[in-house]
Image: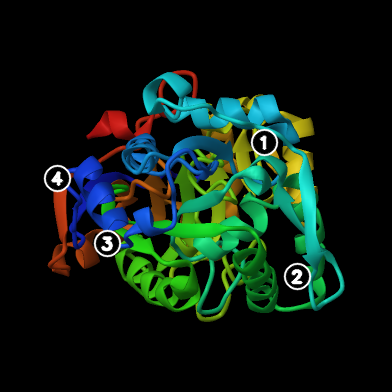
Amino acid sequence: MPDYPDIFRIRQTFERPVVGDIAAEVEAQLSSLSLGNKIQPGQTVAITAGSRGIANIHLVVKGIVDHVKSLGGSPFIVPAMGSHGGGTPEGQQGIIEGYGITEDFCGCPIMASMETIIVCEAAEGFPVHFDKHASEADHVIVCGRVKPHTNFFGDIQSGLMKMMLIGLGKHNGAKIYHRAIKDYEFGQIVRSVGREVLAKCSVVAGLAIVENAYDETGKLQAVAPENFEEEEKELLALARSWLPRLPFEQIDLLLIDQIGKNISGTGFDTNVVGRKDGYHKSGPKEIPQTRLIGMRGLTEETHGNGCGVGNVEFSLTRAIDQVDLKITRINCLTGGEAAGAAIPIHYPTDREVLDSALPLIGLTDSGNAKLMWIQDTLHVSELECSVAYLDEAREKDNLEIIVEPRPLPLDENGMLPEVNSLG
């Protein structure tokens, strides 16, 4: 049996811009677009709500609803996601309601459907799909978070353009777009579809959200449709600079308490853990370089969607038991990543995971392993690290050691607690 490294707890300091009054900022941003010149009293306005667990998303969506009402418009909310929620209207409405986006709270109807219309044919030769309810509205407001994508590269990644592609394309659109991305660059497809939607589908505005490294609302920006592409490039650069990061460049074993679709499209943010450019290994230029990942559970908000389980090497059996295989397979196959639903090696206890993983880190003695342990990739301001990092941690100005080294807290059953209980 391998030795286990002692661990200590650190706190990282990141830049922390915060929007203090969400409702007031949504109102101010949307007012800057003078939408009253376009939205006439009595006209219907579809507002998108996606599947990510975005900070304050219920307040942001309600703020959009309230602004539309102030103009005399008639708003409704459309769950805008590809195959999430099992690819059913009820599943997708359940996801956004779980984030607090309910009819009672927002004060308007939720209109959930998997039905789409075909807007036109893209230049690349495939149909452009658009949510049926949104297509029947007089106007559409696209709301979404801008951030680096977990798989794709380029100057436009996750954001308003992708929301028009995958979110409003629903399951029908997501399937064909992900197929097209196999033959063309992501940037080409997102621009091709996005431009068609902007030209033909009555998009009147966008509201972009950028989060800081603490999973907080760092910036809200209203965007006119004609400026989606250019402004999203700038917002992506900002989002990348605010992205949470792990504190050291080499990781032998990363333990993650929870993964889920509310955390990231791939369950955990590959940009944070160094797995965007390689499958089961880090790309040559990625930081950190992560050898092995151990998953300990799924979030409640992911509703059994274990998309991304195939990207880890080890798991607790309880985490695999939480996976709804049907939902997970639908999502991974729709996204063109069948391996994302593959089941990793799993064991009933953390001790067995450690005993199997630590001998695979190379010639390094397991007691000197570079181990990190996090809640999830949205919350890395505090984390546990093994003593192999201790000297380096003491030299970094942005790190504070808040708990000195002590043994890895395995109980008599070979289980670890949740990492947040150790703070």
**Residue topped by disc 4:** 402
* Label 3 vs 1, first from the N-terminus: 3
Q: CA distance from mark 1 to mark 4?
A: 32 Å
Amino acid type of the residue tagged 4 in the rendering: Ile
Amino acid type of the residue tagged 2 in the rendering: Ile
Colouring used for the render = rainbow
Mark 2 vs mark 4, foreground winner is: 2
Q: Nearer the viewer, residue 57 or 1?
A: 57
The residue that appears at 44% across and 48% down in the rendered structure is: 40
Q: CA distance from mark 2 to mark 3?
A: 35 Å
Q: Quadrant of residue 157?
A: bottom right
* Label 1 vs 4, first from the N-terminus: 1
Q: Quadrant of residue 411?
A: top left
Mark 2 vs mark 1, foreground winner is: 2
Q: Is residue 217 left or right of residue 336?
A: left
Q: CA distance from mark 4 to mark 3?
A: 44 Å
Mark 3 vs mark 1, foreground winner is: 3
Element on which disc 2 rests = helix
**Residue topped by disc 3:** 32
Task: Tell me if label 3 and label 1 are in contact, CB under 8 Å.
Answer: no
